[in-house]
Image (cartoon, coloured by chain):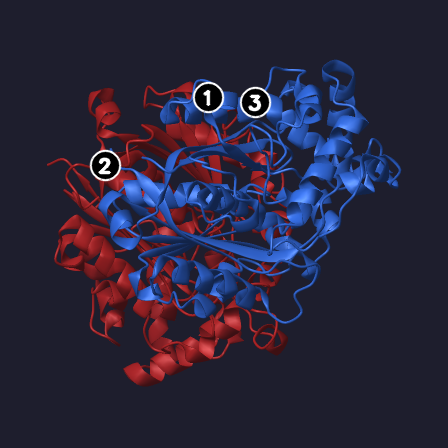
Chain colours: A blue, B red
Amino acid sequence: MTNIAIVGTGQTVHSRRRTDVSQAGLAREAVVEALADAGLTMDDIDSVVIASGPAMFASVNQPEKWLVDSLGARYKPVVRITSGGGTGLAGALAAMNQIKGGFARRVLVVAYDKLSEGQLQASISTLYDPFWGREFAVGIMGFSAAYWRARMDKLGHSEEAAARVAVKNHKNALLNPKAHVKKEITVDDVLNSRPLCWPIKLLDVPPISDGACAVILAADDDALAITDTPAWIRGMAYYCEGDNVANRSMLQSEPLKLAAAQVYRDAGVTNPRRQFDVAEIQEPYTCFELSYYEGLGLCPEGGAAELIESGATTLEGDIPVNPSGGCMGANPIGATALIRLAEAAMQVTGKAGAYQVKDAELALVQAGGGWANLRGVAVVGAEK
Amino acid sequence: MSSSTRNRVAVVGSAQTVLRPAWSDRQHVDLISEAVAGALLGTGLRMEDVDFVIDSGSDFLDGRSISNCGFLGAMGAHHKEESRVEEDGLWAALYAATKIASGSARVGLVIAYSKSSESDPRNFWMSLAEPFTQRPVGLDQNSVAGLYAQRYLAAAGLQASALDAVSRYSWAGATSNPMVDADIATVDPGFWTTPIATPLRQADLARPVDGAVAMVLASETVARPMGVQPVWITGLGTAMDQHFIAGRDATSFPAAAAAAKQAYRNAGVSGASDFDTIEVSAESTVGELMVLEALGLADQGKAINLYADGAGGRLNRSGGALPANVVMASGLLRMHEVATQLSGRSDHAPEGARRGLAHGTGGLGMQNHCVITMEADS
C-alpha cells in the first residue's frame, strides 16, 4: 500500500488584478514558495501536472506550453489537466496516480487562473450546448440560482442561512494573509445586497481573482525524507455526472455522494461530523456550501441551515468549515481546488497561522466544477 | 511500470472512426459514441464494467469551455471518475495506465477526438503561442514547420525535393488504409506542388481531419481471462521542450529523445531496434524525420534513408499522422494502430510483430512528446 503525502505547499498573494506578473510569473511565484517549503529544487521534481480553469478564461490555449519555461521544467514530463473549478483536485489526483503507478516519485502540481485577462462569464456561457442551452443559460449563475431555489423549498436553504456562510467566510478571510477580500459583513448586508440572479445576490458571490497554488507530492519514505510533517492524503476521488439535466438531482449532488462514499471508505471515515477536525470546501456561491454540508454528511439532508445557524462551522465551532475564508477570500477559479487541498494540509501540520484550528489532525476537502456536475473529495491527515 | 509490484496494464480493445476532412453530417457525440462502442465490442466488457474515463479534446477547437462536460454522456462517463487531459490522447492513455498500474482501478476508457473542420485550425495553433512576443509575430504551425525545415535540411545537406520520399510513403500508407479518406492526394492536382511555408509544400504538412478514437485498458487480472490477445503496456515516457521557438534546438527534438529514453528504460529495451512496428506523429515531413532520429532509428540527418523500405517495413503502416492528423487524437490513433497490429486484429501488421512503439506530440512546433511501448505475449 503506497501512501502519498503533501510535502510542500505554496500560494501567491491573490488579488483582483496581478498586473505585476504574467500568467507564467504567477504560476512561478506559487512554485517557488512550494519548493522552498519542501526544501527542494526543480532538479528534485520528476514530473509536473498543471491544472487551470478553461483555457478561454485567460485566452491562452494550452498555457502549460508557455509555463514550462518559467517553472524550469524543460525536458520533464509536463501535462495539463482541466476540469473546470475543481481542476486543482483533478490535477492532484493525476499526480497521485503517477506516483502510485510507478511513473514518478516527486510530482509538482501547479494550479492557477488569471481571470483579469479574459471574459469569465462569456467563457462560461460557452459551456452549454450551442444549439439548445447557450441562449438562455447565461454564465454559471442561472442554473445555480435554479438549484438554490429548489433547495430553498425542499431543504430549507434560506437566504438568511446562505448569508451566514458569506459572513463566516468573510470573517475568516480577515485572518488569512493570502486572501484579497478583507471586509467584515453582516447578514443584513448580504440580504440587502444587489440581486444578480435571484436568490443569488452580490454578497453571495465570491470575488474574481488572479492567483496560483502549488503542491508537491511524494510517497512514504520519499515523503519522510523531505519533511518531518507530511500531510498524508488518506483518500481522493473525482466523479462526474452526465450533462443531461433531466437525469440529475436538483437537491443533492450525486457525483459528490459517490466521491465522498469512496473517499470515506478509503480513509476509514464513518462519522464525518465527529471525525473531521476541519473542512475546506469550495463555495462558488454561498448556497453551495450549504448543499455540501449535506452531501458530505456533516449534517442530515435538510439540516444545513440549522448547522450554519448553530455556529458549529465557525472557526470556534466543532467542525470549522473554510477557516481560510474559502473562495470568499480569494477565488482564482482554476486554483481554488488546490488551495483547499493546500489549506487542509496546512491545518493538519499546524502551519495555518492565525486561522489554525487547534489540534487539527483530520481534514476534509471538497471541490468541483463544470456544470455543477464534476465533484471531488479528499481526506488529509496528520497520520497515514 | 518499472517495479514488478505494480499491476501490469493491457490494451484489450480499441477502435476509431474513419478519418475525414469533414464529418459534416455527424456531431462530436456521434463520432465519440462510435469509437467508444467499437472499443468495447468484442471485449466482453460493457460500459458498467468501466471504472473511469480519461479524455482528450480541445476547448478551443470545440468552441466550448470545459467541453468534456458536454460529452460525458456520449463518453459513457455518467457517475464514473472522469478527467480531461487537454493534450493529445496519448497522454490520456498514459494517465489511464498509471491509474490502473497503481491498483486504484481495473478498467479504464481512453477517448480522444476533434472536429477541426468546425473551426479554423490555424487559430488553434496561433493561440498556443504566448501572447507577448511570439503571437504578435504571426507564428503558426506551418511557419514554424518551415523554419525547422530550413535549418534541418541545411544541416543534413538535403534538398527539399528529398522530402517527397516521406510524403509519398505516408500517403501510400493512408491510401491503402480503409480508415482514412485520402482522396485529396489523387484528385487535387496542386496537392504535391503548392508551396505553403518555404521549403515545405502542402504535401509536407500534416492535414487536419475529423475523427475519434477510443481504447479500453485493463489490469492483468481482468485482461487474462477475457479471451482477447492482451497487448501489454511496457514503457511510458514524456518530456516537454521549452516554449520559445528561437531557444530550441533547430535540427533535433531533445524532448522526444528524453521521452523515448524514459520509455525504453521502463520497458527494459536497448533502443528502437527492439520494436517490430513503430507509429509516429508529426506536423510535417521534417518533423517526422526529427522524431525518428530522436527515437534512435537513425543518426541525425539520416532518417530520410529509412524511407527506402519504411525502416524495414516497420514504420507507420497506417500512413501515420501526416495524411490524417486528428489534432488532440493523432498520438492515441498511433497507439490504437500499434495495439491492433500486435493483437493480430490488423490486416496491415508486419509479419510476426510482437513489440511496438507509439509516439504522440503536442504544442506549437512539436514542443511536447510522448512515447508508449507495448508488447504482445509470444
Residue A224: x %, y % from top left: 26, 48
Q: Residue at x 14, y 58 (%)?
A: B273
Badge 2: how crowded within 10 Å, few (<14), some, or many (20+)? many
* Front position in the image: A192 or A82: A192
Mark seen at residue A261: 1
Q: Secondary structure at mark 3?
A: loop
**Mark 3 is on which residue type?**
Leu
Tell me which chain the residue with mark 2 is part of: B
Up the image or down, A239 lies above or below B188; here it is: above
Chain of the residue under label 1: A
Per the rendering, the mark at residue A298 is: 3
Q: Is residue A294 left or right of residue A192?
A: left
Q: Nearer the viewer, mark 3 or mark 1?
A: 3
Residues packed near mark 1 inside 10 Å, few (<14), some (14 to 19) or many (20 plus): some
Residue at left offset 39%, top offset 76%: B248
Mark 2 sits on what residue?
B231
B173 on left or right of B122: left
Q: Picture quarter containing residue A84?
A: top right
**In this picture, is B346 found above or below B274?**
above
Give, as a three-letter code, the residue at label 1: Ala
* Residue B313 in sight from this viewpoint: yes
Q: CA distance from mark 3 to mark 1?
A: 13 Å
Residue B194 locus on image (x, y percent): 52, 72
B115 or A65: nearer the eye? Answer: A65
Circle 3 crowding by C-alpha within 10 Å: few under 14, some 14–19, many from 20: many
On the image, the x and y values in percent for residue B244 come to 47, 74
Residue A159 as seen in the image, left or right of residue A223: right
